Image: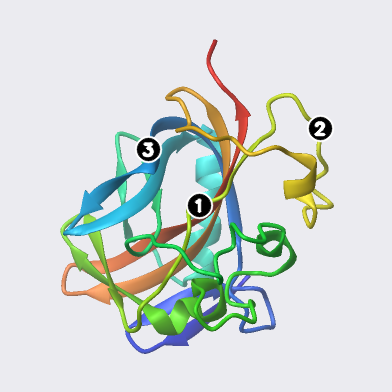
Amino acid sequence: MGLSPHPGNSYIVIGGTNKVATMTTAILVTSSNIHRMKEVFGEDRRMIAGIPHITEFQRMEAGLLMALHLDCAHAQMSQQAITFSTTRTMGTGGSSPAKNPSRMFRQPAGASASRGSPFASAVSNTQGAGYGEYIIFVVKCALTLAAVPVLDARHCRFSLKNLVGLDKVLPAFNAEVPEGSLAWVGYTVNKYTTTRGNHINFNLLWVVVLGTPE
């Protein structure tokens, strides 16, 4: 991992490149608003929240703070649950990763050829601005995105070494992820600074459901 500066913003990239890195974390789901969007500061967002495994969280915390060159930072976290959310009101458009979901595994965020997608210009389009423990995103140009891809791995085996065709191996999970489920979340991370200190955003890309409560 590496760190790339941007005016008022920094983001985690693949080491030795300027390509935004896709991070992953397994969580115990506490809430899901992927289909039923939730309003945040007047904008509808798709989001999922959950508690990472205790050792997973410690590795995640240490790795992110090290990559961002920080001792500590504010994050959208409550009662041990982290919230991963999209950046803006969702719409429809040909640039959607849901139209060709395997692209989200072939390319890191920011690498898409489509200029209308946040995968093409996630950094230049999005800049965080903090308000208390919540997060506002300032978007410099209109973004169009369909629903966050959610895949169902409850009854399938897949290899972490070959994620390119994961959407062809796993079926879609066409519902809200139930509370108490085990989910694997893909996201990007960016940092911004306000008078309140340093803040970290967890920008939701995709979800793989590994298990649901009986």
Residue indicated by mark 2: 157
Badge 1 amino acid? Val
Above or below, 52 against 8 in this view is: above
Could you give the CA–CA distance between mark 1 and mark 2, rounded to whole angstroms?
Answer: 22 Å
Residue 83 visible in the shown view: no
Label 1: few (<14), some (14–19) or many (≥20) C-alpha neighbours in 10 Å: many
Structural distance between the alpha carbons of marks 3 and 2: 27 Å
Q: Earlier in the sequence, mark 1 or mark 2?
A: 1
- Residue 117 shows which numbered tag? none
Secondary-structure class at tag 1: loop
Q: Nearer the viewer, mark 1 or mark 3?
A: 1
Whole-percent x, y for residue 5 in the image: 46, 85
Question: Could you classify mark 2 by the number of other residues whose Cα lies within 10 Å: few (under 14), some (14-19), or many (20 or more)?
Answer: few
**Which secondary structure, mark 3?**
strand
Q: Amino acid at mark 2?
A: Arg
Residue ID at (55%, 70%)? 94
Q: From the viewer's perspective, is residue 161 above or below residue 97?
A: above
User: Which residue is found at the position 55% from the left and 58% from the top?
Assistant: 63
Q: What residue is shown with label 1? A: 148
71 vs 145, nearest the viewer: 145
Residue 174 seen in the current view: yes
Quarter of the image where the C terminus is located:
top right
Residue 32 percent coordinates (x, y): 40, 36
- In this view, the residue in front, 164 or 199, is 164
Q: Nearer the viewer, residue 86 or 9?
A: 86
Q: Residue at x 54, y 69 (%)?
A: 67
Question: Residue 65, how many percent across, how many down?
Answer: 47, 62
